[in-house]
Structures are given as structure tokens and as C-alpha cells.
Image (tube, helix red, strand yellow):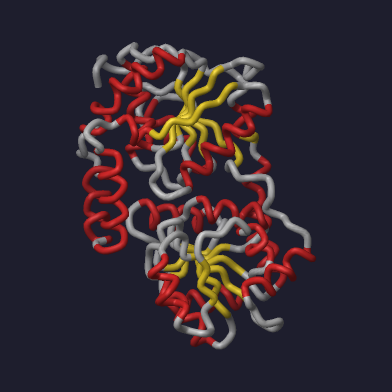
Amino acid sequence: MVTAGRRVLILSAGMGAGHDAVAAELARRLAADGAEAEIIDVLRLLPLRLGPMLRWGYQWVIRHAPWLYEATYQLFFVAKRAPSTSPLTILAAAPLGRLAGRHRPDEVISTFHLAAQVTGRLRRRGRLRAPSTVLVTDFAVHRLWLHPGNDRYLCPNPAMTGHITAMTGRPALCTAPVVRPRFRPPAAECARTRARIGADPGDLLVLVSAGSWGVGAVRETARILVRSGRYRPVVLCGRNAPLRARLGDDGMVLALGWRDDVPELMSAAHALVDNAAGLTCVEAFAAGLPVVSYLPIPGHGRDGALAMARAGLSVHAPDAAALLGALDRLRDEPRRHLQITRASALFTSIPAEAALMSAPVDLPPLGPPGS
């Protein structure tokens, strides 16, 4: 069990802010339960500054050449004949093995798919003695999350647990998404938040999320909302200052930079329009804010948005008319309540930290060693 003094190593990656935020909240919960939790960015384990280069390259492609990321995703993330292990996995394996040897963790938890590949490889080769758990943060699980060397998987989407087990031969458990416990602020704070961001009393606010990097076609989304005359967009531009400046030229768009009051913003909004199916969506689910996916970023963003819509957690709008139609339907209280209830049900699953309290079964490797 997770008891005082139990050492847990959490592997994350600074690709945006979502994986790190999940790792930080999980570490906080485990520490409150008596564990010693340490977070390591798996990108820092790569030699020759490949980690920062990988982060910069991914950010550039998502912003300027999304078609290239889509091609990469199709070839290496979901294709049936894709290589089973990337060169990055091999490069990070030895540093992680040495790190684990020094820290001697009682368990290693991965919140990023590259980390899951590295721990699976080390476990299968007998070079990682601690059990390895993968905490999947995506609603659509691509193959790079899945390595049979890992001991078990925790997943927020109950529809994916059978697929994970079928692909890896390892147990998979549906757990509640890991979200900070502050996403239901009081009504009085909601009113203060509206005034603080400059919203007029009669504005029906729609949050538009662009992630921490401020990516995607959010300017188009904002224009659609403004032209409708029914909704005022509040665009979360993250750390993309040029995007915020461009959007700020339109007096009807409330363009915000990096914010620490996202729970309060969600409490003041009619809905969230999201393009990545990441942590911001899960935070909206926790806050009781309906989610509409529109123009998702390619690859995992699109697949995640479609998976959430199939589960009835959100609405996927394929075009501008569908976007406005979805927002209009959310003004009907029974429809709105139904969508919120479905999303809130995610949090009735066992919390991830509670699932981690039971030591995983130490399964033998599958297939030939070294894969």
C-alpha cells in the first residue's frame, strides 16, 4: 500500500502544460497519503538536448504545419505496421535505469506516452525492479501509450480499458480523471470574475481554449461566436502573447493570457469550446461546464474529441453551423443538465491515488526480451 515513506517516481513531459499538471496533482495526493513522490520530466533524460528540440519541434509543427503532425501521427502512432519502439525510447532508457537505480522507487508512474514506452522497455528487460503503472491522460489511446512490459494501466475512459488489455495483456482499470480540487468556486466569485475580465452584465460568455501554447484555429472560432451576435468569446491564449495581441484588436473578443483563475472563468461561462481534448476539457467536466469540440488539432486532439463525443461527454461540431447549434441547445436546461451529468459521472470512478494504494501484480514479461 501507499504508506509513509513509500517512494514513488512520476514521469511526465513538458509538452504543453497538461501532463505536468496531472503529475503535480497526483504527487500532491500521494504525498497527502504519506508517500514520497518525485516528478521527473522524461524529456530531460534525452541526450544532446534532444528533449528541448523535440518540444520546440512539436510546438512549431502544431502551429505552422499541422498536416505534418497528422502524417507523423498516422505513420508512427496509429498505423498497424509502425515500429514498436522509437529511437527516443532507447535513448531515454539507460538514463532512466540509472536514475531508478539511485532513487530505488517502490513504484514508477508514467503520465506521458514516451515515458510509458521507456518504463515498459526497462521492465521487460529486467532493468527496472519497481512496478510500472501507466496513467493514461488521453481519452483516445494510441499505440505509443501501450507497452506490454508495464504492469498495469489506469485510464479515464471506461470504453478503452478492454482495448488496452487486449493490446498489452496487462490489467487496465478505469479511474477518475486527475484534476485539482478547486473547480467549483462560489457564485459570488463568478460575478467578480466577470467584472475582472471586462465582461458586460448581459454577455453570454463562451470560453475558447487554445492550450498553454495558444495553438489551433481559435481566431476563426472567435469570429464565428462574435458574428453570431449571441455569444462573447473569452479566448484563453495561454503563453502565446502574439495571439493575444491579434485577438485583442477586436473589442468583442476578451483575449486572456496565462491564467490562474480558470475555475472562476469556467464558473462564469456558458460553455467551453476546446480544440485539444486535453486537461482543460477534464477541468470543465469537473466544474460542470459543458464542452463543445471544434476544429481540434490533428492526431490525438481529433481522436480524443471524437472519443469524448462518442461517450456523450461532449459535443463534436464539424462546422460553424454545428458549433452555434450546439451552443444554442445548451441553453435548454434539460439538455445542458444531461451533458453535465454524463461528464460528472467520470468522477464517480475510483480515484487514481486510491487505485495506486494496491500494489500491482508483478507479471512476467510477454514475448521475447529486448522488445
Q: Residue at x 52, y 68 (%)?
A: 256
Residue 365 appears in the rendering: yes
Q: Where is residue 311 in the image (x, y as percent from the top left)?
A: 53, 53
Vertical placement of 270 versus 283: above or below?
A: below
Residue sitting nearer the eye, 104 or 282: 104
Q: Is residue 214 left or right of residue 32?
A: left
Quarter occupied by residue 281: bottom right
Quarter occupied by residue 240: bottom left
Residue sitting nearer the eye, 331 or 132: 132
Vertical placement of 194 versus 24: above or below?
A: below
Quarter occupied by residue 46: top left
Q: Position of residue 216 (x, y in %)?
A: 38, 65
Indicate the quadrant containing the C terminus: top left, top right, bottom left or bottom right.
top left
- The image shows a total of numbered marks equal to 0
Residue 157 appears in the rendering: no
Q: In this view, does 301 lie to the left or right of 258?
A: left
Residue sitting nearer the eye, 117 or 33: 33
Residue sitting nearer the eye, 28 or 299: 28
Q: Where is residue 365 in the image (x, y as percent from the top left)?
A: 35, 15
Q: Which residue is drawn at 65% across and 57% down?
A: 263
Indicate the quadrant containing the N terminus: top left, top right, bottom left or bottom right.
top right
Q: Where is residue 293 in the image (x, y as percent from the top left)?
A: 48, 64
Q: Residue at x 61, y 30 (%)?
A: 353
Vertical placement of 314 versus 32: above or below?
A: below
Vertical placement of 313 versus 316: above or below?
A: above
Q: Is residue 39 left or right of residue 73?
A: right
